[in-house]
Amino acid sequence: MFLGTHTPRLDQKGRLFLPAKYRDELSGGLVITKGQERCLYVFPTEEFRRITDALASTPVTAKAVRDYSRVLFASASDESCDRQGRVTIPAKLRDYAGLDRECVVIGANTRLEIWDAEAWSQYEAEQEPAFAQLSEEVLPGVL
């Protein structure tokens, strides 16, 4: 499970230090792909395989599944951390997410998300007022 908020910087070669506490879980490889709201999703390879298997079991006749799968898989990139814990983010994905230098890496349960720092700040400010109200809708009877 990935938790927390971290603020690494992207270097000139497009590399980002992943938080040390996540490196063991990502040591078997990772997949970076487009996420919603112009962030990037980072999945451990095993979790991405689970998603792949789930999508493979859906009918190819479903247009929404085809559309989502095309974008998800076409933008996906197999990566691994170097010995210093850095991962290279492909240029097309950096452009998609508007990543320049200041980034935010958030834990989002089974994945990490990489955001441009300003975009994350704006998203968080917009979502904060609704957060309390959403708990009943998202987790009825749990919280």
Image (cartoon, grey):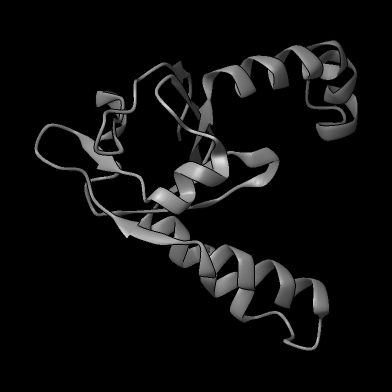
What residue lies at 37% left-to-right and 51% top-to-bottom?
Answer: 90
Q: Quadrant of the N terminus?
A: top left
Q: Quadrant of residue 128?
A: top right
Task: Name the residue at 73% across, 72% down.
Answer: 67
x and y percentages locating residue 72 in the rendered image = 58, 63
Q: Residue furthest left?
A: 83
Is residue 73 among the parts visible in the rendering? yes
Taking 81 as reference, is 123 above or below it? above
Could you tell me residue 88's position as x and y percent? 28, 44
Q: Is residue 6 above or below residue 63?
A: above
**Residue placed most toward the observer, 75 or 2:** 75
Left or right for 113, reference 37: left
Splitting the image into 4 quarters, where does residue 47 fall? bottom left
User: Nearest the camera: 68 or 1?
Assistant: 68
For the question of whether residue 24 can be seen, the reply is no
- Image x and y of residue 43, in percent: 44, 49
The number of discs equals: 0
